[in-house]
Amino acid sequence: MARPAPDGQPLHRRIGSELRAQILGRTLAPGAQVPTEAELQERYGVSRSVVRQALAALEQEGLVERRRGRGTTVRERGELHRLVQRVPGLSTQVEGEGVHVTTRILELGLEPVSEATGALASDRVLRLRRLRSAGGEPLALIETWLPEELGDLTAEELTDTSLHATIQRRFGTHVVAGKRQVRAVSADGETAELLQVPAGAPVLLLEGTSTDEAARPVEVFRTWHRADRVVFDINVIREPDAAGLAGTGAPAPAAPVGTTSLRERLDALGREMLDLARELERAEGR
């Protein structure tokens, strides 16, 4: 058995934790060579059996591959990408890339009081917990609250399908907008078990609300994503230069030839409205 580190943690776990952090943080990128057993022995001052125990745990997690004659390398893992600013959820986006996603319903039932009752303006809410997987491997744990008016949804019709598509088909409710927040958190015991990651492993938490065409709240949700499998993409655009120069005292650049600034368009519209008012006055005085 490996002797403990000064902090009381077994040395093989400490070595595994540090290598895991390097892999998940991409200091050791997919396909990269992990330091040899001899190098790890020297670095940590431990026996070969301790190093092998740490590497075996990482191999069991699917983070590394160990092959005779090639040493240990970081396993190539297919990343699944999700555009955070898009309304469609993980299953819709990932299946759009040709990856089949399955959904298992963990819990479904009405709650009289919830943290979401105020946000949804509903006395009771429907609480839904789901587990998304791809290729038999869990990707995300989703916790959702819906207004009571959607309370007759069943587990059967929510299995292996999109929630938004289901409520649109059943109730004619179109989810068109929302607010999203992303933060990195540690997986607690239950979350880690469901996502098949070590307890305390970093996961990406996406939470927010969604609204329909009338700006009414439709859902409140939290989704924990495996940080080693799911990547959040964000499309960015350059803001107008004038916005970046506001308050700096620097003059705004002139509009390119053939284009019209918003200020010029507003001024022209104002002049047209004034001319129209004058014409109406003349017509009424005739």
Image (cartoon, rainbow, N blue to C red):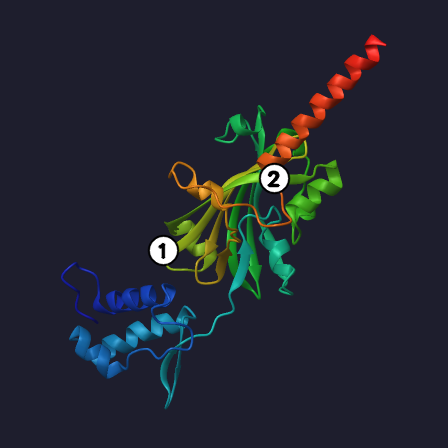
Instruction: Report how far apart the C-alphas of labels 2 and 1 lie in the structure.
Output: 34 Å
Question: Percent x, y for residue 115?
Answer: 48, 31
User: Is there any visible trace of residue 142 in the rendered image?
Assistant: yes
Q: Residue 33: where, in percent of width, then height?
A: 35, 80
Q: Position of residue 222 (x, y in %)?
A: 49, 43
Q: Quadrant of residue 29?
A: bottom left
- 89 or 5, which lies in front? 89
Residue 182 in the figure: left or right of residue 85: left
Left or right? Give the position of 37 relative to 252: left
Q: Is residue 234 rendered to the left or right of residue 197?
A: right
Task: Choose between 208 and 240: the one closer to the eye.
Answer: 240
- Residue 63 in the image: above or below residue 261: below
Q: Which of marks 2 and 1 is nearer the N terminus?
A: 2
Question: Callout 1: few (<14), some (14-19), or many (20+) C-alpha neighbours within 10 Å?
Answer: some
Q: Which mark is residue 177?
A: 2
Specify the label residue 199 is tagged with.
1
Query: In the image, what residue occupies the spot 34% across and 54% down?
Result: 200
| Residue at disc 2, secondary structure | strand
Q: Which residue is drawn at 16% across and 64% down?
A: 5
**Quadrant position of the C terminus in the picture:** top right
Q: Residue at x 60, y 59 (%)?
A: 94
Check the image and report above or below for 179 versus 1. above
> 27 or 132, which is in the foreground?
27
Rendered location of residue 45, percent (x, y):
15, 75
Kindly identify the residue that appears in the image at 56 percent across and 55 percent down: 132
Is residue 238 shown left or right of residue 278?
Answer: left
Name the amino acid type tagged 2.
Ala
